[in-house]
Image (cartoon, helix red, strand yellow):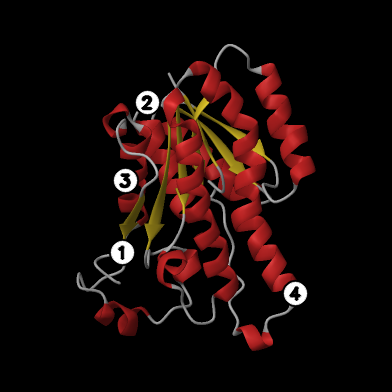
Amino acid sequence: MKTALVTGASRGIGKSIALTLAENGFHVIINYRSNDTEALKTLDEIKQRKKSAELLKFDIADPVSVENILGKYIETHTDDYISILVNNAGIRHDNLMVFMNPEQWSNTINTNLNSFFYVTRLLLKNMLTGKFGRIINIASLSGLKGLPGQTNYSASKGGLIAATKALAQEVGKKNVTVNAVAPGFIKTDMTDGLDEKNLKSMIPLQRFGEAHEVADLVAFLASEKSSYITGEVISINGGLY
């Protein structure tokens, strides 16, 4: 049974990814920062399905927290390494740049982009030694085309896409693949405040996506079936460009 770490897995897309990977036979490490109630709900849903999972609470945006908690986990689990990593956790602080404060910029970049470095770096060595790994980064339509009011978010996701392509070239020879998934408008708490009726008229499929549809794509990229796909950014947005 391969082990998968999903960051930000207590709610939304991350939760759906955790559930789907568990259903596909992975032991899932559910990472979260603060919401114990929702994290326990995710764990309970997996356990109710007779699948394997555990919680690992740490702040992906804090390098000390990552080193102390994830680093210790790696040190104490030498029999099996984390071979699947889904960098999903992220935040939005939308604002027009003229009104954006430094904290809205730095917090978004740190949580969405710097965390990719903090977490992935710790897991890479074992993936390279074991000659198998799947790194899947949850990017965004905003990182591909840019969206007004999301200069910080677009910068973080655009940087994540560029990092995906670069890292894929570094580790491919060791059978480690690195890909990004770029969702459009997906029904989660992050899109609750959006005007769905108006926005879906811009989407060829005329609807917002569902979290499980993103999760199914991630599960494919985590599987052996995706072994010749790396350095790619796969959009899942109903045809919105």
Q: If you read the primary sequence from the N terminus, does the residue marked by circle 1 or circle 3 appear first? A: 3
Three-letter amino acid code of the residue under disc 1? Asn
- The residue sitting at 31% across, 44% down in the picture is 216
Q: Which residue lies under the disc numbered 2?
A: 25
- The residue sitting at 45% across, 69% down in the picture is 142
Res 197 quadrant in image = bottom left
Disc 1, SS: loop
Res 50 quadrant in image = top left
Residue 111 is situated, as x and y percent measured from the top left of the image, at 65, 56
Disc 2, SS: loop
For the residues bearing labels 2 and 1, Cβ distance under 8 angstroms: no
Disc 4, SS: helix
Residue 103 is situated, as x and y percent measured from the top left of the image, at 75, 71
Q: CA distance from mark 1 to mark 3?
A: 12 Å
Q: Which mark is residue 102?
A: 4
Q: Which mark is residue 217?
A: 3
Q: Which residue lies under the disc numbered 1?
A: 237
Q: CA distance from mark 2 to mark 4?
A: 43 Å
Disc 3, SS: helix
For the residues bearing labels 3 and 4, Cβ distance under 8 angstroms: no
Q: If you read the primary sequence from the N terminus, does the residue marked by circle 2 or circle 4 appear first? A: 2
Q: Quadrant of the C terminus?
A: bottom left
> Which sits in the foreground, 47 or 227?
227
Mark 2 burial class by Cα count in 10 Å: few <14, some 14-19, many 20+: few
